[in-house]
Image: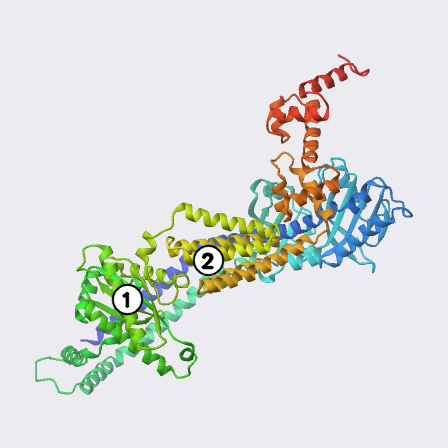
Amino acid sequence: MKRSVYIRLLLHLTVAVVLITCLIGALVYRYTTAMLKEEIIGANGELLLQTSKIVDQSLSEVQQIATSLALNPDVVKSVWLPWNLEEEYRFLKSASDLFATRINSSNYMHSIYLYSSVNGKLISSSGITDRVDFSYRPVLERFIDRPGTWAWEAASVTGASGEHENVISFLLSVPLNQSEKKGVLLINLKEDVLYNAVVNTNNRKLGNVAILNEEGKVLSYKDKSMILEPFGQADLDQIRDAKEGYFIEQIGGEKMFVSFMRNPSNGWIYITLNPYGELFKRSHEVIRIALLISLIGLAAGVLLMVYVSRRHYKPVRNMVQSLLAYMEKPLPKAKYGDEFGFIRDSIDRLQHENDEFKTKFRGQELVVRDHLLLNLLSGNVTDSDGMNGQMDYYRLDLEPNGFIVMVMRVHMPDPILTASDEQVRNMIHFHIRAVCEEALGHYGKGAYVSRFHKHDVLILNTSGTDSQETAIENVKELALRIKNEVAEQLEGISVTFGIGGRYEQLSEIALSYNEANEALLQERIAGIGSILSIHDMQVNRASRNRFIAYRQTVDKLIGDLKSGRTDQAAEAKDEMIRQLEQDGQSGFSSKSMILSYLVNALVAVRIELAGSEEPFEQEDRWHREFAKLQTLEQIRLWLDGVLDAIDGELEHKRGNKNAEVINKLAAYIQEHYREPLGLQMLADMVYMNSQYLSKLFKEVTGSTFIDYLAEIRYREACRMLKESNRNIIEIAEATGFGQKQNLIRAFKKWSGLTPTEYRNREVLGRLNSPGHTD
């Protein structure tokens, strides 16, 4: 070879590197700006969506607090009754204390005010204020004058030290179901604390989000001085029409990239502000980096060309010397010509010596052989023909078709499990392997894999059997033989077997292995030392009626638990466990399904007790603990603890005041009277016995549940008969009576008239009234 060959090769390589680098730099520079813009838009969109969800959740909590305050009896009294401080001081003091408690329990509540139009004054945690002296009077009057039962506003107040504080105000009409605003509940939130606690929880990701109302006024931002000037009308129109998107705006003398999203529920606008120059600074750096890389590549190519052209013979000589050192015998004299021919012949000679080396150590390839079996169990079979060749090469005692996998779990007594000498355990596993391999010799063809995923595995051939049932029975006999041999030779050691299904192809061995593991999971129901087959689990399933009977037992148990009959619930649980132990007709998978149904039902009761605001850590812990239980006795004892925990929480629920419970139910009935309501449904809602709830309802309201519900529906029906032309059937359905006959019976009871007679009487009365004119 000539030196010019290397020079031309390296020169072409250098030129190619430079050209490719410049081309890539130009393309990257061209598309960087577009990709950065898409990335920024996507990131800001996700940021705004997350912020909207977080803010909506936090403000929803404030709305829930306001709703609970609006339903408080003392708050309602403060709105409707005149404020006679000498006679009615108690409910005013109670309302003021309630507001103080709410403020103290929250980090971002600034103040709570209750306005009564009857008195023209407001009450708060600090006392009573006249409307004319109220610092939030403009916000209050705007809310009173416009329709709607609630609204959010931004305001600025002067604190005790004379400093201005920014707040976000939530206003709610009291009572809730009154179209005329007799009272207003106003909750002020500390804007900066709320922003830091809710919006700015991660300063890197959420630190540049601003919240605006529908008019573009800033409700919350970390630095309001940046956007003191509201956006133009064109920008606001674009935000309202597009719902989400971006635009570029000059803010504070700086070009800003503004991403926005409008919340459809309250009309609030969420925006992010990013300096335009900073965002796209990277695109201008790409061309400089590309040029720098091109120069570096050119310099490196030139240096490499010079170096190799001068020293290209030295690596060849070094290679020849290395080959001579590795060869035990020199090459015979041959016409190999030059160093390259010598290198070729030397590599052929070393390959021949390597083949001789592999032949000498072929008997020591047990590790590679086991690796092949692990690939079969893991499903890593891409070439069945190649795998068959490897099986022949490693002399595995397996036919290429017909397989069943059996998984074996070894149970050792506690002294061995806690022993510090690991050699004892290894000897036990070695002994068990010897027993298995001896049994395999009597069974037929198969292979043994030790400690695969903590279990011993046997891959068995079934090509000599005609049916799947016969093959499964033969494998069971082998498992029984191994089990008896282990029990006889190793005292205190027991084994459990899981048997998978029968498959034909090498690639399906992993399926049989997974089924064997699935069958082994039922050991906690069947017991240690069992022989579990996936085939038996599939053909020996419980009938549908049997499963329904177990499910009805679970439902009755849950009903007893909710009604306070904990002892009866525990007895039902123990009886069901005994039935599962003695049930020979239901398969293991059906029994496991029944136990899972019971656990899920108990978790559902716990979730009902906790409510939607409490995290479900307890329920997750129950699921993890249940998955670790090994026997039915352990499951029974664990369920006792779960029942006791739920009963304790139910007892705490029942300790609430009865009058408060009934008032909440009465409010629920007034709101949902159009729906089908029943006493048992209400009893389940408050975890009471239906008979006890009926008695309690009569004591608090003075009427039975049926009469109370019927009277509400009757009053609504009277209103609809007076104010609408809807027929009797439609009114019956709209007021919750359902059938026309139910509406007629109610009118007969309350007015002595039919609905038609009542409507005619009202029409005739209007016609005969002095103010009526044709």
| Viewer-proximal residue among 333 and 172 | 172
Question: Which disc is residue 578 wearing?
Answer: 2
Is residue 756 found left or right of 390 in the rendered image?
right
State the quadrant of the C terminus. Answer: top right
Say which residue appears at 90% left-offset and 48% top-offset: 85
* Residue 677, picture quadrant: top right
Mark 1 is surrounded, within 10 Å at the Cα level, by few (under 14), some (14 to 19) or many (20 or more) other residues, namely: many
| Viewer-proximal residue among 656 and 189 | 656
Residue 636 x %, y %: 50, 61
| Viewer-proximal residue among 205 and 342 | 205
Residue 741 x %, y %: 61, 24
Residue 591 x %, y %: 42, 55
**Residue 267 visible in the picture:** no
Q: How many marks?
A: 2
If you read the primary sequence from the N terminus, does the residue marked by circle 1 or circle 2 appear first? 1
**Residue 405 visible in the picture:** yes
Protein image colouring: rainbow
The image shows residue 602, relative to residue 296, as above or below, that is above
* Residue 475, picture quadrant: bottom left
Element on which disc 1 rests: helix
Label 1, on which residue? 479
Q: Residue furthest top?
A: 774
* Residue 602, picture quadrant: bottom right
Say which residue appears at 28% left-offset and 73% top-offset: 485
The image shows residue 446, relative to residue 98, as above or below, that is below
Element on which disc 2 rests: helix
Residue 186 x %, y %: 76, 47
Is residue 22 found left or right of 199 in the rendered image?
left
Is there a contact, CB below 8 Å, between mark 1 and mark 2?
no
Q: Amino acid at mark 1?
A: Ala
